[in-house]
Image (tube, rainbow, N blue to C red):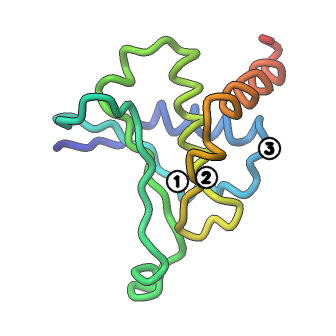
Amino acid sequence: MKYEFASDLQMRMYEIASLLGMGHVDTDRVKCFRSYGSSTKRTIARCHTIGKLMQKAIGVKAHYAIEFLEKFEKLSREEQDKTIIHELMHIPKSFGGGFRHHNFVCEKNVDLLHQKFLNLKGMG
């Protein structure tokens, strides 16, 4: 696997989190990466973090990394934005190193936030 920081996706993540009022997401502690060489068949993106015990062990606050796999590049801009929203929704209000599950991070909720994003951008 190869990873590279994705500054363009980082900027899109900032814009989406800001416009949607995701104040609980400390965007300075969320980094976006492109990855190459994954053997997964269906995954487009995934969110990573370090658990609370490791945070305490190494003396850091929670950080999140959003990994965008090669398939992400083939999506339309709209589907890419929905994917970014989906991954941001996994970050809980506590921003403590855990995740929100797919009972909350579902297509219906992603679509609602995506429509809100488009409306706030004046595109809805």
Q: CA distance from mark 3 to mark 1?
A: 16 Å
As helix, strand or loop, the secondary structure at mark 1 comes to strand
* Image quadrant containing the C terminus: top right
Q: What x and y, as percent, mark residue 6?
A: 40, 37
Q: What x and y, as percent, mark residue 76?
A: 49, 11
As helix, strand or loop, the secondary structure at mark 2 comes to helix
Which residue, given by chain and number where applicable, does mark 1 sit on? 30
Residue located at (47% from left, 30% from top): 8
Q: Quadrant of residue 2?
A: top left
Q: Which mark, residue 17? A: none
Residue located at (79% from left, 44% from top): 21
Q: CA distance from mark 2 to mark 3?
A: 12 Å
Q: What x and y, as percent, mark residue 37?
A: 16, 35
Q: CA distance from mark 1 to mark 2?
A: 5 Å
Q: Which mark, residue 27? A: 2
For label 2, the crowd category at 10 Å Cα-Cα, with few meaning under 14, some 14 to 19 and many 20 or more, is some
Q: Quadrant of residue 70?
A: top left
What is the three-letter code of the residue carrying label 2?
Thr
Answer with mark 3 or mark 1, whichever residue precedes in sequence.
3
Q: Quadrant of residue 121?
A: top right
What is the three-letter code of the residue carrying label 1?
Val
Answer with mark 2 or mark 3, whichever residue precedes in sequence.
3
What is the three-letter code of the residue carrying label 3?
Gly
Along the line of sight, the residue nearer the viewer: 2 or 115: 115
Front label number (2 vs 3)? 3
Residue located at (47% from left, 50% from top): 31
Residue located at (47% from left, 86% from top): 56
As helix, strand or loop, the secondary structure at mark 3 comes to loop
Q: Which mark, residue 21? A: 3
